[in-house]
Amino acid sequence: MRYSYTLIQIVVLFLFCIENSLAQSREISGIVQTATGEPLPGATVLVAGTNTATISDADGKFSLTAANGQSLRVSFIGFLPSEIPVTDQTTYTIQLAEDAQNLEEFVVIGYQSVRRADLTGATGIIDAQNTNKRIARSVPETLQGLTPGVAVRSGGAPGQEAIVNIRGLSTLFGNASPLYVIDGMLADANTTVNPNDVETIQVLKDASAAAIYGSRAANGVIIITTKKGKEGALKVDATVRVGISSLPRRWDMMNAQEYVETNTRAYQAAGYALQQAVAGYNGAVNTNWADELLRTGSIQDYNINLSGGGKDSRFLISGSYFSDKGIMKARDFQRASVRINTEATRNNFTFGENMMISSTERNAPFQGGFAEGNAWYDIWTSLPIIPVQSADLVSTSNPGGWGYGSFNARSFARNQAAINNITQSTSNFFKVLGNAYVDYKIFKGVSYRFNAGLETSFDKTNDIRKEGLWYWNQSPEFSSVGQTRSQFLSYLFEHTLNFNFTFNKHNLNGVVGYTQQTIRNEAVGGRRLQLGVYGGDYFTTINSASGGMTATGTRSQTLINSALGRLNYNYAEKYYLTFTFRADKDSRFSPAHRTGYFPSAAASWKISNEEFFKSDLITELKLRGSYGVLGSANLSNYQFTGFLNQAPRAVFGSGQTEFPGATQARLVYEDIKWEQKATTNLGADLVLFNNKLAVTVDAFRSVAKDVLLSLPLPLYIGNLQGDPLVNIGSIENKGIELDLAYRQTSGPFTWSIAPNFSVIRNKVLELGNLGIDEETGEPRNYIQSGNTRSQVGRSIGEYYLIKTDGLFQNNEEIQSHRAQAAYAKPGDVRYVNRIDQGTNDDINDRDRTFAGSPWPKLTSGLILNGTWSGLSLNIQFYGAFGQKLYNDVRREIDGMGYSNYRRGINPWTPENTDTDFPRLGVSYSTGAAGDPATADRGIVSNVRANTDRWLENGSYLRLRNVELGYSIPESVTGKLHLSNARVYVSAQNLLTFTKYTGLDPDVVGANFNLEPGVDLGSYPSSRIISFGLNLGF
């Protein structure tokens, strides 16, 4: 709150210090026309230096308020902008001349800006007006649903980074995230970057668009351009947004009395003596663990921008503070940042820089491993008959008296309230990101650019673990403190030569260049036991501890040198060719394979510019095609080098003398090389109804070759540090994308609608030699990860499970099902016995089969905008359809042993057979007398993990964001000495339509590559209601 209070003071200071002698505004009107007098509907009319703007109607007419001395800046796609001074007249006729060199806005595609109309590659262009409608911790989080082919899974934890995947998955074990380029610097767009600083985002999807980034472009490229200053008087914009967050849905768990009644029935059905805490329950304890651990979160987002400049120089300075106090207690995130972007022109030189400084802090309980568990399991599985704390539980090893499971109240759930109090981890990240550049116009059409980029961060994490216990059978531990310090440094030098020539109807432009990037990582850490305590307070430094100490340290450096080039050619703006090439030399590979080459070629035909093409319906029609090769380097340093272990000693001779020895510690594949992805793209761009409707469709196919996999080798041949990486895999992705946008700008009510759709399929083509399948004795052509299997000829991460076939209703059904006849009872789950294993037949792993895919068959986004008389409405939907999700949280809750029960379960009984929920029982591994032979194997079988009982329909449609705003009239803002003011209210994740029973169908999987649809209690997305105020001075 200290930061937010300071920022509010700054905003108030600017309110009083900004110039307060604005001239009297008045209503003016006019018409925008072409040079031949035809009206131009949809032209933008802006009062320069303010946010006051309007759009001309179907007849080219407009009206707004302005004052003498101001000027009107009028623009329209394909025409030269015009700036008209405001004088005493009240009506203006403004004619715009066609711009043959600027038929559409320019977009950044990597080392070059080109007209959008001239693009030959598949590029998604995202306006910050849509990304800034929602509160987000990071830039990638804002992209969900805004462009086809881009999948985003963000989760809801404060400070959590989003997972972004473009056009499918092209690697199995490596990093599948796209490359981010921020203002020309290849950098990480994590939570340290303020999303409100962003002006535009371009997503490079195919080889023609992305090959200029070569070895780092296989997963796509996202180019982020931040806001810049513009010519005009000093402009100050301030934004204040505050909101509350909550969990949209909860598991409806039983209270203590309901648990006691249900558990009594289960134990009696199993023949067990009741747990003492159940048998002697007197109503004294009734813990609602969700209420103990969850809260209404709060979010604050403050931004202030100062911008302006003259003809030869421009600047923008911004400051921001963001705070997210999460919906789960003891977890929060804060970020403060400053950005300075400047540019100046003198003669043939242009100098500029973009710099961001940010400081973030993330607080959460310490997660040291298994002992801390997962709060999103424990909230629901913890028993309501166990207290959070009790004086009766105080002991030397549990001084806080924290409650947890025992033989008398059986639960292995962690007391997360205890963990919140006993442990703490604070991570601080200080980051500097930016670049400085100089452009020199050598002569007309040729310019040289030098760009120097820097990304560095200084990070530290302090964690503490006090004495205490929080789960059943936990061994007492000493208190401890840990500290880590790390530094990341990346610096980039780029030399590029841009050229642009036109002769007759031939247009030629492009770029050639050379780049050098160095990336360094250093980290040190230490941990020490037995903290000093004084008056009940713990000292939190390593020096204050007195027990055992451990220390770690790492260091790495990567050098990447690159040569690049792109050539764009078009004839008469009808026929387009693009050739792109990049060669990368990366120190992570052996000298023999250190250099990779990544070419691409593309062509397009703008049919609408042909003389024979005459249509009143179609404004523009262009066909595109591209092919190219992209790369990926999914490995760390020295993977091509073997290691020796010199620690062993050999004993020889009668004197048992020790001699030094050596063993091979790691086997390597010296010929390890780049993962390469060959991509083909066919597309079409269509504009209809006088620029009102735009349609873009793309079909693509990519084949990733030389995918890195771990080759399983036996330990006895020296494979002691993990299986070596080899290039033996191949993966195919193919799909179709459709992007639509329609806008209606005439009349008092203007609106637009922009739906997009993606259909993407992946397939494993090759996995090399992975050994022998123990079940079949055949060569193994799959990778098993948990309950998923990635097999040649099928999608990555498909579920491989035993299929269920309802419940047994009587003994006759059981006896006819030989595999379960020995132990099943009426009301137990019946499984499909896929393979008859003879006299030893039983349901086991050999009965598993493919049961569904975690990948959506269709994803879709929808953006709706409308404005009327100062009111504005923005609605965003996102949906994913056709995927299956494995609900591991429900499996744990319905485990029939050590968990609370869900309300509303409908267990099978002889009187209640019309249900899919099996009979009540206890899934213990031993019977009532402690003999494993008398365990109720039917109940144990009912809750086995490797079955499709836990597989659910994961399709969903989410109302991602709704924002309703009102722009305060000029008649009011003028009296307040404001250029503009807007208030708004927004709701994020307001509604989700799904059959999935978990907390959030937008799960962040257990392993995004191999288990993307396994819900292991990922932090769900929050529902956020926020209020905002924008002020302009």
Image (cartoon, rainbow, N blue to C red):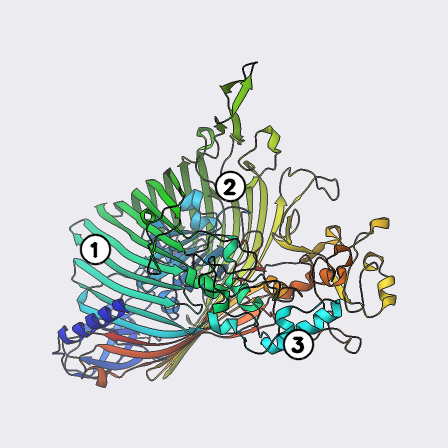
- Secondary structure at numbered mark 2: strand
Q: Badges 2 and 1: C-beta atoms under 8 Å apart?
A: no
The image shows residue 567, relative to residue 95, as above or below, that is: above
x and y percentages locating residue 380 in the rendered image: 56, 68
Between 376 and 999, the residue placed more toward the observer is 376
In the image as oriented, which residue stretches furthest toward the left?
A: 21
Q: Is 1010 placed left or right of 436 in the picture?
A: right
Question: How much space separates mark 2 and mark 3, taking CA atoms?
Answer: 58 Å
Type of amino acid at the residue the image marks with label 2: Glu
Q: Left or right of 812: which side holds 21?
A: left
Q: Looking at the picture, how far across and down is residue 515, in whole percent?
A: 33, 40
At numbered mark 1, what does the secondary structure look like: helix, strand or loop? Answer: strand
- Closer to viewer: mark 3 or mark 1: 3
Instruction: Kindly state the secondary structure of the residue where label 3 is placed.
Output: helix
Residue 811, x across and y down, in percent = 86, 67
Instruction: Identify which amino acid the numbered label 1 is placed on.
Output: Glu
Q: Would you say residue 139 is visible in this rendering?
A: no
Q: What residue did someone put label 1 on?
A: 343
Q: Earlier in the sequence, mark 2 or mark 3?
A: 3
Label 1 Cα crowd, 10 Å radius (few <14 / some 14-19 / many 20+): many
- Residue 114 lies in what quarter of the image? bottom left
Name the residue beneath numbered marker 3: 261
| Figure quadrant of the N terminus | bottom left
Q: Amino acid at mark 3?
A: Glu
Q: CA distance from mark 3 to mark 1?
A: 73 Å
> On screen, 15 above or below 519?
below
